[in-house]
Image (cartoon, helix red, strand yellow):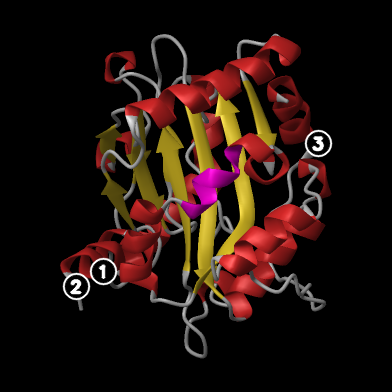
Amino acid sequence: MSELKNEFNKNGYFVVKNSFTDAEIQYYIGEFEKMNAVKSRNAWTVPDGVVQQKAFWPIIFKEELLARIREVLGDEIRFMQHNDLHYGYSSFAWHRDSINRGYAETYPDWQEDKEPYLIVRAGCYLQPEEDNFCLGVLPGSHRFGEQLSKEEFCDIDSYLTKTQIAKAKLGLVDHLKEKAVWIKTQPGDCIVFDPRLIHTGGGFERRKYSFFTAYGVENFHFRQHYTYYRHLRKDLGYEAIPSALVNMLKENGLYATEEKYNGKIEGAWVPSNLYSFVANFFE
């Protein structure tokens, strides 16, 4: 097993430095600014934006990034339709990107006895280092037993799901902040992480540009994750992958059959009305 794979299994994330050239960084910043000329907002997100905006398609095929992902997941990775564009936006609440945001033994995201969970998200950042953005992660919060005991894992999970939002609103101490690793990004850096990893965005001083893609190995977990974002989370507005992009994915061996999982997805997180109301301010 490679050192990178060991690191990923233990911590739930790894960093790929300088994944994009200066020219590529400036190109994508320009595309963000073109979109903002229409939106004219200080902060916004576009779920499924990488797929629906042709200018961002090359991101999906970035070989420097794919090589590192294959090293930890294997050669049979496929593109997962779970992607976003972020402009001037950072989530300041601790969260997971998986189907099951909390832990329960019966929830599918935590069941790996039959098929392993082989999905990653890749968050890539373009803003200058002096903007002082950091991503906070809780190492080992993607799977107990690698770094955290089950008791430690459940204690963190309980804090995340039951009290974190209330404490944040009351201005009380954020105990997860003390446990976190804060990753300061440079332009072109990508942070690859298990969607079950607890993480949060940090502050920044001027503008933040980032995009997120996802990859995985086709199995039960892959199909459920795809179905959750493409079909169950209607609030996000995901659409069918454009046929031209489908052809590119097939040519590069990254196309996953768009097979919908028809069973019940137990414990799937869906946003409350309040969450959706707040999220609308960033669309």
- Which residue corresponds to the image point at 39% horizontal and 72% vertical from the top-left? 73
Marks 1 and 3, how far apart in space?
39 Å
Is 189 one of the magenta-colored residues?
A: no
Nearer-N-terminus badge (2/3): 2
Nearer-N-terminus badge (1/3): 1
Question: For the residue marked with disc 2, what is the amino acid?
Answer: Ser
Above or below, comparing residue 214 to residue 10 in the picture: above
Q: Is residue 253 left or right of residue 47?
A: left
- Residue lying farthest left? 3
Q: Dot 3, how many residues are within 10 Å of its Cα: few (below 14), some (14-19), or many (20+)? A: few
Q: Quadrant of residue 85?
A: top right
Query: 201 and 246: which one is in front?
Result: 246
Which quarter of the rendering shows the N terminus? Answer: bottom left
Q: Position of residue 29 (x, y in %)?
A: 50, 22
Marks 2 and 3, how far apart in space?
44 Å
> In the structure shown, which secondary structural element does the residue marked by tag 3 occupy?
helix
> What residue would you read off at disc 1?
5
Q: Dot 1, how many residues are within 10 Å of its Cα: few (below 14), some (14-19), or many (20+)? A: many
Q: Which mark is residue 24?
A: none
Q: Is residue 150 left or right of residue 32?
A: left
Q: Magenta stretch mostly in which secondary structure?
A: helix
Q: Is residue 143 in view?
A: yes
Q: Position of residue 62 (x, y in %)?
A: 43, 50
Give the foreground label among 1 and 3.
1
Tag 1 near tag 3, CB within 8 Å:
no
Above or below, comparing residue 90 to residue 204 in the picture: below
Q: Dot 2, how many residues are within 10 Å of its Cα: few (below 14), some (14-19), or many (20+)? A: few
> In the structure shown, which secondary structural element does the residue marked by tag 1 occupy?
helix
> What residue would you read off at disc 3?
273
Tag 1 near tag 2, CB within 8 Å:
yes
